[in-house]
Structure formats: structure tokens, C-alpha cells
Image (cartoon, helix red, strand yellow):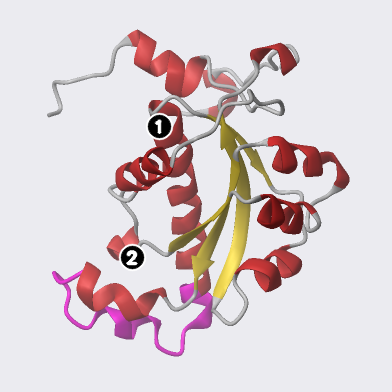
Amino acid sequence: MTDQILSDRDLDVIFREARSFKGWQDRPVSEVTIRAIYDLLRWGPTAFNASPARFCIVQSEEAKQKLADCAMDSNKEKILTAPFTVVVGYDLDFPETLPDLFKLYPGVEKLFEGNDDLTRETAFRNSSLQGAYLMISARALGLDCCPMSGFDAGAVEKAFFDGSNIKANFICSMGYGDRDSLPPRQDRLAFDQACRIL
């Protein structure tokens, strides 16, 4: 598998030409596609194979309005006009599933007993990874993304994760982007600005 690489076109779609869209085509996204996104992202690596991310797919008009009410003003329209928005959460009860997910290390869930800091750090970091896998998977399947952090986390948790131990990480609107709505692309740091080889 290591000798197989994606084409330049594939890399353009996933990274080089991908943008954060704020305008969307009037084009629905099927449940088949949404499920296919998850079926790809779930194979991305996480610590202990813990897979702590939980994804709430906000698609109905009522649910979109509920989420928009939790967002800062500049993000409301992005949520309301997108075909759907994913609330990426992290489950602080993820150790309960470790016996099924990480059988190579029996009793691994005991590492987290009484260690709230390690539990939260592991859940947050690895759900962030899974949120990135979500975006890469969506782009690979032809969708566009708009990740956002401007929202009231407590309000989102009450609206979508009430009664659970799931916390909100970030949200990401998805659909088929309207390229006419894009501003000029901003630059990125060069290798020497962001990286060191030691």
C-alpha cells in the first residue's frame, strides 16, 4: 500500500484547491453520502483506537435553526443555508467502549479511571483528529466544508447532547459549495516559517 499515492488532481480536491465555503449550491446531499463520509473517517487512527468523537448531523430546518441560535451572528447564515452541519463532539465516556475497540491491551480503560484530565485531553485531541478526517472524507467524496468555532458550546451541548457526557468541539457545515461566493484565497505559511528539521 505504501507505494500507492493519490493523483495530483486528488490532492487538489482534498487540499490545494479546497476552500472554506460560506455559500452553497441548492443541491441536496443524500443520506447515502453522509453515511459514506463516516464509513471513511472511522478508519483514521486515534489513541488506543478510542474513537471518542460523536457526530450530530444537523439537517432539518428545525435543527438548523436550533444550531444557528447557538452560533455567533457571522456563522448563522452558513448554518441555515448549508445542506447540513455536523456538530463534532467528544464523549467523555469513551473509555466504556475501549474493551471492544482496543482488545490488544486488556484493561486499558482502567488508565482513565479517576483521571479526568487524561480523559478530557484524550477525548478532545482525538475528536479533533476525527473532525479533520471528517473533512478530508467529505472532500474526497465531492463535498465542500466550512469548519467553525464561533458558537456557545454550552448551548450546543444542551440543544444536541443533553443527558449525555458529550461535549462540543467544533461545527462544520457541508454541501456543494458555490464558487461564486468565495473571496480571494488567503496565503499560508511557507515550510521554513512553520517547520524545522532537526
Quickly name the residue at label 2. 50
Label 2: element kind: loop
Locate residue 6, reporting x and y percent.
27, 18
Q: In the rendering, at what x and y percent does residue 67 appear?
A: 72, 56
Residue 185: image location, x then y, percent: 68, 14
Relative to 158, is 141 on the left or the right?
left
Kind of residue at badge 1: Leu
In this rendering, is residue 18 above or below 28?
Answer: above
Q: Tell me what residue is drawn at x 37 percent, y 10 percent.
A: 9
Does the CB distance between marks 2 and 1 fall below 8 Å? no
Q: Quadrant of residue 177?
A: top right
Foreground residue, 140 or 6?
140
**Residue found farthest to the bottom:** 114
Question: Picture quarter containing residue 87?
Answer: bottom right
Marking on residue 148: none
Residue type at numbered disc 2: Ala
**Left or right relative to 147: residue 8:** left
Residue 146 magenta-highlighted? no
Helix, strand or loop at disc 1? loop
Which range of residues does the magenta coloring cover? 102-119
Residue at (29% x, 12% y) in the render: 7
Q: Quadrant of residue 30?
A: top left
Q: Which residue is mark 1?
A: 198
- Quadrant of the snapshot with the C terminus: top left
